[in-house]
């Protein structure tokens, strides 16, 4: 029995435009020689959608003979009603043909490919999913071909950060000592780090019916996946007492109306990431810190779906004056005097106010698998 192990050299997370390097390790655990007829590899991005909700264009359902290979089935998981279409792929590469592996022998083949630009980032939504995979097909003589698909995570540098990198002047002085230049992905990650670290404090005054309810202060509106979204709520200027404020960090998946079936009414899907609730009865300022998991998707949009992030504030205010409040005198013991304890009202006329603050979520190079690999038995 022969085995092939596909092992990615890095942590499984890549920036679009990066070079993926992996090793294909062939081993023969049988007592007789094993022959490999051919081995092929390809990187592709597959869009998986809920077929009962979205419609696919006829051009997307057709396979392209230039970019797709016979060992890559263009479909999703039929068990959960998914239909897939390949929206981005590299040319299939034949790594070896007609190779014999002797017993107890091991052979290693390297595969190098550039992650294509122009595609969406990896995204696992409720209606749409974008999945990048490294597909490796292997076939022995007189045997059916076998395929292993190794998922990888791909992030995209936003266009407004990528353009300055492409337009930066290049030094062409032949008398200067040439230094090793950073790759476009490294420069892009540095630009993301600088963008997410810029402190541009923004203040927003909340009003209802012409009356001031409070003020929200945020140190910045751009964050990276894995950061903590911080905010301050100032209720010292509120006309009415603010009883409670809830801050929630959510991302919203909005599907293009042209892609939805006419018989389906689809609303944006809201997913809550973090939430904090604080009482403001006797407070003038409250602080919020909402952690962002690094495994989620960045802000992006394409012709099918738009993913954006928001901080949602839910306020509970009192429309009337404090009523039914009283104090109770309590002795502090011999020689301790008397203390007054305040008691809140038994009932109060309250109102709710909702307000949203859009934020930009930038990507971060993170993968849960330190060195992804899969083994295929032939």
Image (cartoon, rainbow, N blue to C red):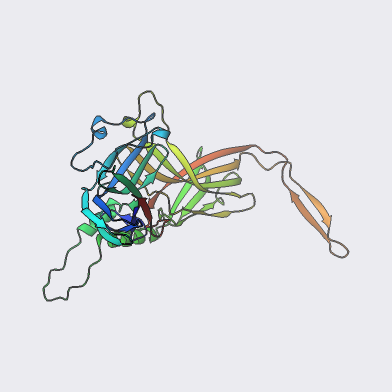
Please give the name of the residue rendered at 65% of the width and 37% of the height, measured from the top-left corner. Answer: 349
User: Residue at the left extreme?
Assistant: 174
Vertical comparison of 184 with 211: above or below? below
Vertical comparison of 77 with 309: above or below? above
User: Residue at the front extreme?
Assistant: 31
Residue 146 point in image, percent of width and height: 31, 45
Residue 317 point in image, percent of width and height: 59, 42
Where residue 191 sits, quadrant-wise, is: bottom left
Looking at this view, is 92 or 54 the one in front? 92
Please give the name of the residue rendered at 33% of the width and 52% of the height, measured from the top-left corner. Answer: 155
Residue 147 point in image, percent of width and height: 31, 46
Q: Is residue 322 left or right of residue 363?
A: right
Is residue 343 in view from this perspective? yes
Q: Is residue 134 left or right of residue 95?
A: right
Residue 297 point in image, percent of width and height: 39, 48
Is residue 303 in view from this perspective? no
Q: Is residue 357 left or right of residue 301?
A: right
Q: Is residue 371 left or right of residue 248?
A: left
Looking at this view, is 54 or 231 the one in front? 54
User: Residue at the right extreme?
Assistant: 334
Number of dots carrying numbers: 0
């Amino acid at each position: 029995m022969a085995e092939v192990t596909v092992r990615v050299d890095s942590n499984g997370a890549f920036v679009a435009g990066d070079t993926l390097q992996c090793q294909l390790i062939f081993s023969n655990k049988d007592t007789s020689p094993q022959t490999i007829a051919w081995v092929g590899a390809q990187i592709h991005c597959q869009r998986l959608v809920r077929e009962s909700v979205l419609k696919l264009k006829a051009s997307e359902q057709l396979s392209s003979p230039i970019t797709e290979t016979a060992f890559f089935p263009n479909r999703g998981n039929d068990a959960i009603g998914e239909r897939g279409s390949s929206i981005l792929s590299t040319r299939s590469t034949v790594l070896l043909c007609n190779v014999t592996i002797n017993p107890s022998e091991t052979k290693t083949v390297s595969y190098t490919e550039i992650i294509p630009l122009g595609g969406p980032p990896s995204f696992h939504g409720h209606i749409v999913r974008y999945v990048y995979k490294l597909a490796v097909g292997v076939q022995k003589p007189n045997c059916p071909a076998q395929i292993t698909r190794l998922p990888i995570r791909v992030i995209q540098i936003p266009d407004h950060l990528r353009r300055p990198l492409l337009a930066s002047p290049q030094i062409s002085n032949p008398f200067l000592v040439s230094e090793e230049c950073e790759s476009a992905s490294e420069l892009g990650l540095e630009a993301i780090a600088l963008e997410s670290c810029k402190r541009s404090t923004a203040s927003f005054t909340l009003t209802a019916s012409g009356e001031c309810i409070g003020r929200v202060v945020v140190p910045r509106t751009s964050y990276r996946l894995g950061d903590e979204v911080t905010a301050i709520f100032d209720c010292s200027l509120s006309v009415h007492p603010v009883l409670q404020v809830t801050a929630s960090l959510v991302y919203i998946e909005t599907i293009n109306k042209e892609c939805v079936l006419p018989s389906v009414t689809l609303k944006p899907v809201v997913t809550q990431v973090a939430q904090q609730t604080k009482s403001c009865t006797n407070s003038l300022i409250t602080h919020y810190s909402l952690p962002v998991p690094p495994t989620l998707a960045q802000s992006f949009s394409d012709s099918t779906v738009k993913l954006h992030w928001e901080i949602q504030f839910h306020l509970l205010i009192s429309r009337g004056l404090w009523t039914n409040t009283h104090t109770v005198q309590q002795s502090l013991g011999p020689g301790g005097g008397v203390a007054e304890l305040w008691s809140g009202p038994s009932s109060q006329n309250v109102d709710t106010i909702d307000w949203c603050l859009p934020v930009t979520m930038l990507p971060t190079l993170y993968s849960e698998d330190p060195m992804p690999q899969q083994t295929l038995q032939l």
